[in-house]
Image: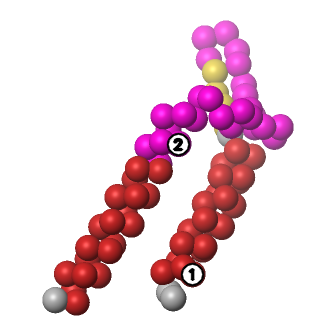
């Protein structure tokens, strides 16, 4: 029965994670500076546009790393 408990906990955590991702995606347009940080590259020419959110990706990676490390440390207790 311990296997069901661990699977249940994992599904709850995964569901919470998906919920948070959904909230972020829903309100991403209203979060200031996301996608418009200095260092993000935008190329716009006639009939062509290309966007590389390099700095935004780095900042989000750092934030997600910190959040996931905190979650993992709390679950190990």
Residue 64 is left or right of residue 14, and the answer is: right
Q: Which residues are magenta?
A: 21-48
Query: Residue sitting at 41 percent across and 50 percent down?
Result: 19
**As rendered, which of 44 and 72 lies closer to the eye?**
72
Tell me the distance, in whole angstroms, between the alpha carbons under discs 2 and 1.
23 Å
Q: Position of residue 22 (x, y in %)?
A: 43, 43
| Label 2 CA crowd tier, 10 Å (few <14, some 14–19, many 20+) | few
Q: Is residue 68 above or below residue 73?
A: above
Which secondary structure, mark 1?
Answer: helix
Which quadrant of the structure image shows residue 14? Answer: bottom left
Identify the residue at image location x=60%, y=60%. 64
* Residue 43 point in image, percent of width and height: 72, 25
Residue 28 image offset from top left, x and y in percent:
57, 35
User: Disc 1 designates what residue?
Assistant: 73
Task: Identify the colour scheme used.
Answer: secondary structure
Dot 1: within a 10 Å radius of its alpha carbon, few (fewer than 14), some, or many (20 or more) residues? few
**Which residue is most to the left?**
1
Look at mark 2 in the image and give the residue it sits on.
24
- Quadrant position of residue 30: top right
Q: Is residue 44 magenta?
A: yes
Left-right relation of 5 to 59: left
Instruction: Identify whether 36 is placed above or below 20.
Output: above
Q: Residue at x 70, y 44 (%)?
A: 56
Element type at mark 2? helix
Quarter holding the N terminus? bottom left
**What residue is drawn where x is 47% and y is 48%?**
21
Using residue 38 as the reference point, say whether residue 28 is left or right of it: left
| On screen, residue 44 above or below 60 | above
Whether 70 is among the magenta residues is no
């Amino acid at each position: 029965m311990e296997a069901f408990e661990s699977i249940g906990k994992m599904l709850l955590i995964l569901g919470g994670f998906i919920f948070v991702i959904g909230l972020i995606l829903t309100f991403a347009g209203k979060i200031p500076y996301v996608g418009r940080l200095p260092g993000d590259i935008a190329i716009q020419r006639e009939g062509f546009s290309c966007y590389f959110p390099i700095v935004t990706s780095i900042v989000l990676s750092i934030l997600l790393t910190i959040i996931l490390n905190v979650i993992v440390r709390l679950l190990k207790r």
